[in-house]
Amino acid sequence: MDRVPDSVRFWIEVFGRETLLAGFPGTKLYLMLRQECCERRLQVKAPAPGLIPRRLRRRSRCRGHESLASRIRRHWRQLRYILKRLRFHVVEDLRYLYESRRWKRLLR
């Protein structure tokens, strides 16, 4: 821990436990940590997804002859998935914006 910059150590103290113990699909609070690491020129191995996803998941495809009922179920599952992901991104983006403002005040 002695080699970790103070701001990174502070992020771990403030958000680390909550981020680590968050259930699926997690939080976006780690984006603040990635930003701190980049500002301190620390290596970060994997590229970070942004606040807003760039594309949707591939649509499920029809397999052969499909009845109307199975087509409706397939489209309904796809719509539910999209709405669930949209809710996650809206909630976590708002939370990220709130916490990032708080984070900047804490760093001062």
Image (cartoon, rainbow, N blue to C red):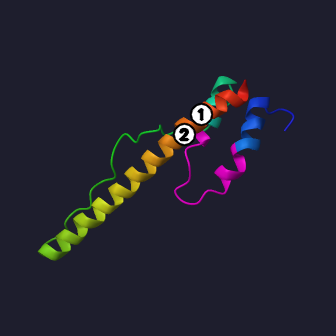
Crowding near pointer 2: few (<14 within 10 Å), some, many (20+)? many
Residue type beneath disc 1: Ser
Q: Quadrant of the C terminus?
A: top right
Question: Which of the pair 85/108 is nearer the observer?
Answer: 108
- Say which residue label 2 marks: 96
Q: Is residue 26 magenta?
A: yes
Residue at position x 34%, y 52% in the image: 57
Left-right relation of 26 to 76: right
Q: Quadrant of residue 82?
A: bottom left
Residue 10 in sight in this render = yes
Residue type beneath disc 2: Tyr
Residue at position x 83%, y 32% in the image: 3
Residue at position x 56%, y 49% in the image: 27
Give the extent of the magenta segment.
15-31
Percent position of residue 40, x then y? 70, 24
Label 1 and label 2: CA atoms lie apart by: 6 Å
Percent position of residue 53, x then y? 40, 42
- Say which residue label 1 marks: 100
Q: Is residue 50 magenta?
A: no
Residue at position x 71%, y 31% in the image: 106
Q: Is residue 85 above or below residue 2?
A: below
